[in-house]
Amino acid sequence: MNIAFFLIPKNEVVYLPVNSTMRQALEKMEYHRYTAVPLIDEDGKYAGTITEGDLLWKMKNTPGLTFADTEQVMIDEIPWRMINNPVRVNAEIEGLLSLAIVQNFVPVVDDSGIFIGIIRRREIIEHYAKQCSRKPDAI
């Protein structure tokens, strides 16, 4: 089954431009209660994912950094501890399971690498749960 069926389109996804500040990331994550958001470059391509952990590690490892100072810290100055690998829109759902094990969501890109949306772990699990419930007991 093609993953397009599970796609949450870009216009419904919370994301940040890669040239955002640390404060913008903190505020967007707090407002939406997300622990990670995709980052999009100036060409609309998927650039990576920033997580709460990345922001916390940056604060911990930057002596004297205050919340007010986060307006001066750019996202591209923050090391990412996790790489959320994207998939192409023509991928099959079976290929997402291994990604969903370690990622809350899987970014989806077109053939040019342009970010077009995400597939959440929840939809992948629901798909496989339905598949399992349709199979007769093997007794």
Image (tube, rainbow, N blue to C red):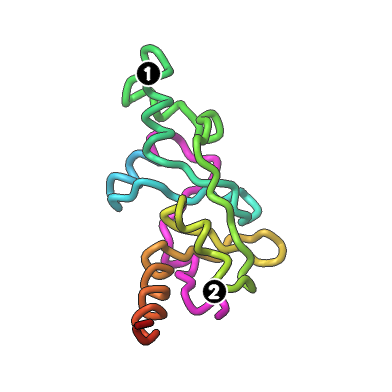
Mark 2 element type = helix
Q: Position of residue 130 (x, y in %)?
A: 37, 80
Residue shown at 42% from the left, 17% from the top: 62
Looking at numbered disc 1 in the image, what kind of residue is underneath it? Leu
Rendered position, 64 above or below 70? above
Q: What mark, if any, has residue 3 been given in the picture?
A: 2
Q: Position of residue 82 (x, y in %)?
A: 50, 40
Quarter-of-image position of residue 95: bottom right
Residue shown at 37% from the left, 87% from the top: 136
User: Is residue 3 on the magenta stretch?
Assistant: yes
Q: State the separation of the CA atoms marked 1 and 2.
A: 42 Å
Q: What mark, if any, has residue 95 been given in the picture?
A: none
Give yes or no for contact between labels 1 and 2 (Cβ–Cβ under 8 Å).
no
Mark 1 element type = loop
Q: Earlier in the sequence, mark 1 or mark 2?
A: 2
Residue shown at 67% from the left, 59% from the top: 113
Please identify the quadrant where the C terminus is shown. bottom left
Which is nearer the eye, 127 or 133?
133
How packed mark 1 is, by other alpha carbons closer than 10 Å (few <14, some 14-19, many 20 or more), is some
Looking at numbered disc 2 in the image, what kind of residue is underneath it? Ile
Does residue 134 appear left or right of residue 80 in this picture?
A: left
> What is the magenta range?
1-24
Which is nearer the eye, 90 or 22?
90
Rendered position, 65 above or below 15? above
Quarter-of-image position of residue 69: top left
Rendered position, 5 above or below 58? below
Which is nearer the eye, 106 or 24?
106
Residue shown at 55% from the left, 70% from the top: 94
Q: Position of residue 107 (x, y in %)?
A: 53, 59
Q: Which residue is mark 1?
A: 65
Which is nearer the eye, 4 or 9?
4
Q: Position of residue 52 (x, y in %)?
A: 37, 38
